[in-house]
Amino acid sequence: MSEKNKLTLSVQYADTRLQASITRPLIRKWIKAALFAPAELTVRFVDADEGQTLNREYRGKDYATNVLTFAYNEGDELGNPVADDEPTRADIILCTDVLEREALEQKKSVEEHTAHLIVHGVLHAQGYDHLDDEEAEEMEGIETEILQALGYADPYAEQQ
């Protein structure tokens, strides 16, 4: 395994609805495609209640959202990156209820939408963000490139 994307992965299905279709090997494949450095990640699937609680507690937003990323070593308070030998550490929380609803609304498969949200979360864990237009454009471009390499459509293309 290349040191570039060495991965220690824990997958938790607190909400088990996707456990049979969104398997650990699939999740691992998606994550490794989006890693630019070694990482220790947990991916957790939750229901709307847990998703809403986490979003309210940690972001002050009282609704369930599709994905939350809790990155534990994004850098210090001055914006300096962590040491090169320090793996990225993060929890990526996916809300099954929101994920399934969005996939239906966007006319995508649950697998395709889950792949996008996991890639999105992994990029957040590595310090990417979309707070302004320039950051959003960069992050969306990287997501699209990764997903197309995995065989999925551009997640930002106009929906038919």
Image: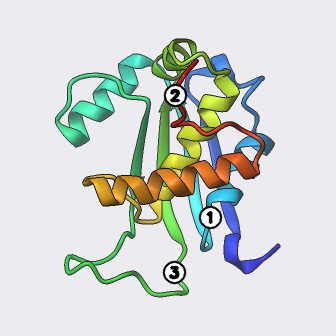
Q: From mark 2 to mark 3, how far is it between C-alphas? A: 39 Å
- Label 3, residues with CA under 10 Å away: few <14, some 14-19, many ≥20: few
- Locate residue 134: give its quadrant: bottom left
Question: Which residue corresponds to the image point at 51% horizontal and 80% vertical from the top-left?
Answer: 86
Question: Which residue corresponds to the image point at 55% horizontal and 27% vertical from the top-left?
Answer: 14
- Tell me which amino acid carries mark 3: Glu
**In this rendering, would 86 be left or right of 37?**
left
**How far from the left and from the top, in percent, is residue 127?**
40, 65
**How far from the left and from the top, in percent, is residue 101?**
50, 13
- Tell me which amino acid carries mark 1: Leu
Question: Which residue corresponds to the image point at 26% horizontal and 53% vertical from the top-left?
Answer: 131
Image vertical order of residue 72 relative to residue 17, above or below: below
**How far from the left and from the top, in percent, is residue 18?**
67, 22
Name the residue carrying label 2.
Answer: 158
Mark drawn on residue 35: 1
Name the N-terminal-most of marks 1 and 2.
1
- Locate residue 124: give its quadrant: bottom left
Image vertical order of residue 22 relative to residue 106, above or below: below
- Tell me which amino acid carries mark 2: Glu
- Label 2, residues with CA under 10 Å away: few <14, some 14-19, many ≥20: few
Name the residue carrying label 3.
Answer: 86
Question: Which residue corresponds to the image point at 36% horizontal and 52% vertical from the top-left?
Answer: 136
